[in-house]
Amino acid sequence: MYCTRTLTDFVSWVGGTDRRLALFENLFPIPRGITYNSYLILDEKTALIDTVDSSITLQFLENIQFVLNNRPLDYLVINHMEPDHCASIAQLLLYYPNLKLVGNRKTFELLHQFYHLELTGRTIPVRENDFLSLGSHTLRFAFAPMVHWPEVMVTYEEKESLLFSADAFGSFGALNGALFQDEMDFDREWLPDARRYYGNIVGKYGSQVQRAMEKLSCLNIQMICPLHGPVWRKNIDYIWNKYSRWSRYEPEEQAVALLYASMYGNTENAVNLLACKLAEDGVKSIAVHDVSSTHVSTLIAEVFRCSHLVLAAPTYNNGIYPEMLNFLHDMKALNLQNRTVALIENGSWSPVVGEQMRAFLEGLQGMRILEPVITIRSAPSAKTLEELEQLSKNLLSSLGTAIRL
């Protein structure tokens, strides 16, 4: 049975949700599922904007057939060739034998790599700023390479000022009936997943996001229609400003995240002591995560959110504790920048992890190491407590007055 939503008199959402999938890209936990968005425009000609993952192809085809109401499907615009958005192309070509595929040169290169389809006479290659008239509606194309694949483009519909933004401005999470951001409490229900989605999927490509946003800033955008998550039709500046900040690697909040590894609880003890001291000193935005039991995608979301980080770990095989090292490698891979970081190391006979973490962080842009670096010998001592009290004061001073209760 079809399940669609109306965006405008001429545009419908024909996507769907998957709450069975446990790992997005077989990597990122999605306990709330995922949404695959696709949009259908009706005019003198009809145009579908992207397809969906193979897991919901049947639902997708029923949605399209309902909205078309026996009309032909003339065009499929392929903004992004990742399989979760293009896995239904072959089925569409069978259902609609006159369908033409619209994409750029790299789109069709990837299409032939993924799916060995005979497309002679069925493709319309486009370049930057080309347009496609559907009648009263006109689609104009802008390239957004590496946001987050090299072939990515976005499509702007000029009559109703709609931006079909590919993976940009998207989010993890399955829609629960509500499609539009103003139909939900976005801050409470969606912002953590939108941040985690950005940091882990798009986060590495901040400069490319900035270039794309600069290119699009001259447009009158009345609605942002991403390929995952809610559609934005009100307060668009909210998500635009989030992306602007995230892509410049500016912390979203003046806040402290304490991220630790602990084998037998002693390093954790020191982190708990510091967290309590920070709270006593007036810090109200404190997050504490065990890197061994918190998925690294959540840790990445936190470091995109917070201005100040505390990294605490034991020395392991004369190196950085493996789960902390994995997290540091992810931070580097995703190009994190411009944070203040405090370090706590533990080592019963040869504590070296502090210097190794410092060296790792010094390889990232704009990372400031906050002193003192605290060394624990096996378990926290009275000296450790004094040093934690000093570190709390230094963190408080660095944070400024905005975080006081």
Image (cartoon, rainbow, N blue to C red):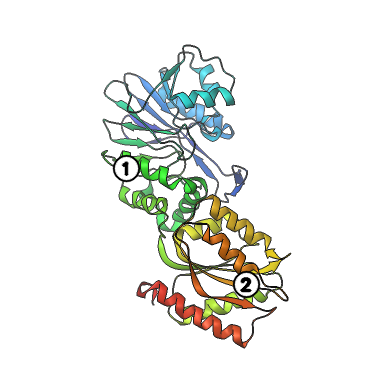
Q: Which one is nearer the viewer's eye here, 159 or 381? A: 381
Mark closer to the chain start, 2 or 1: 1
Q: Amino acid at mark 1?
A: Glu
Contact flag, marks 2 and 1 (Cβ < 8 Å): no
Q: Is residue 290 above or below residue 22?
A: below
Residue 245: percent from left, percent from top: 38, 54
Residue holding disc 2: 345
Distance (Cα) linking label 2 and label 1: 42 Å
Residue holding disc 1: 214
Q: Is residue 32 above or below residue 124?
A: below
- Farthest residue toward the top? 121
Quadrant for the C terminus, please: bottom left
Residue 27: percent from left, percent from top: 61, 46
Q: Amino acid at mark 2?
A: Glu
Identify the residue at horizontal 48%, vertical 27% (top origin): 106
For the residue labelled by badge 1, is the local secondary structure a helix, a strand or a loop? helix
302 left or right, relative to 139: right
Q: Residues within 10 Å of mark 2 (few under 14, many from 20)?
A: many
7 left or right, relative to 37: left
Residue 264: percent from left, percent from top: 71, 73
Identify the residue at horizontal 73%, vertical 76% (top origin): 349
